[in-house]
Image (cartoon, rainbow, N blue to C red):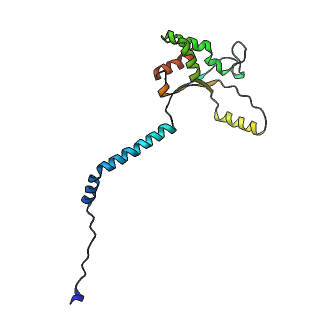
Amino acid sequence: MEGNRKPEYYEDEIELIEYLRVIWRRKFFIFFFVVLCASVATAVTIVKYPMKAKTECTIQLNFSGIESAKNPDGSQFDRRQIISPMILSRVCAHFQKEERQHELLGDIRALVSVEPVILPEIQEAMATAKKEKESYAFFPNQFVLNIATRQETDIFHKGEKSKILRLIVDE
């Protein structure tokens, strides 16, 4: 009557406790592997994207003539006038580092950039004019002042950078 016997079913049992024991035995290998991967990822990120400390402000010039790139005295306006040596020397005078004032003037001038703010609709009009080989005159009255430095070579801390930009705007 062996034919009437029901066949025995063997289920493959998965014991999670065995997996946990294997993981526990290899914990140092797993920890080492995670730390290695995190270190490599951090190193690649630092090399590919160096950290920069950036401080910026936007200024708007409101005086008659700016819409046609003229100073109030009628002379031609140039955005580099915003960080002229005269203005920057006044900014440097506010710092109590008198022995470094001349050095600071060069440092600040090299670090500060002045970029015009050009609205998207103006950019489109400029692109259209360029395609049609026409000229398009636009004289911005808004500018972004940036101080961007690599953190490891930074001579100013963030508070000083903000103060520098505020002083430039005040001057």
| Quadrant of the drawing holding the N terminus | bottom left
- Residue 66 located left or right of residue 166: right
Residue sitting at the far left: 1
Q: Residue at the right extreme?
A: 133
Q: Which image quarter: residue 9?
A: bottom left
User: In front: 49, or 87?
Assistant: 49
Front residue (pair 108, 145): 108
Q: Quadrant of the C terminus?
A: top right
Q: How many marks?
A: 0
Q: In the depicted view, which residue is nearer to us: 83 or 43?
A: 43
Name which residue lies at 41% across and 46% down: 37
Residue 132 location in percent, x, y? Answer: 78, 39
Check the image and report above or below for 127 versus 32.
Answer: above
Left or right of 123? Residue 40 is left
Q: Which percent across, then down, holds residue 23? A: 29, 54
With 150 as the anchor, is 30 left or right in this view? left
Name the one closer to the observer, 107 or 13.
Answer: 107
Residue 147: image location, x then y, percent: 54, 24
Q: Quadrant of residue 138?
A: top right
Residue drawn at point x = 29 percent, y = 50 percent: 27
* Quarter-of-image position of residue 7: bottom left
Q: Residue at x 75, y 31 (%)?
A: 136
Determine the residue positioned at 68% across, 17% down.
Answer: 64
| Up/down of 14 relative to 99, above or below | below
In percent of width and height, residue 60 lies at: 61, 22
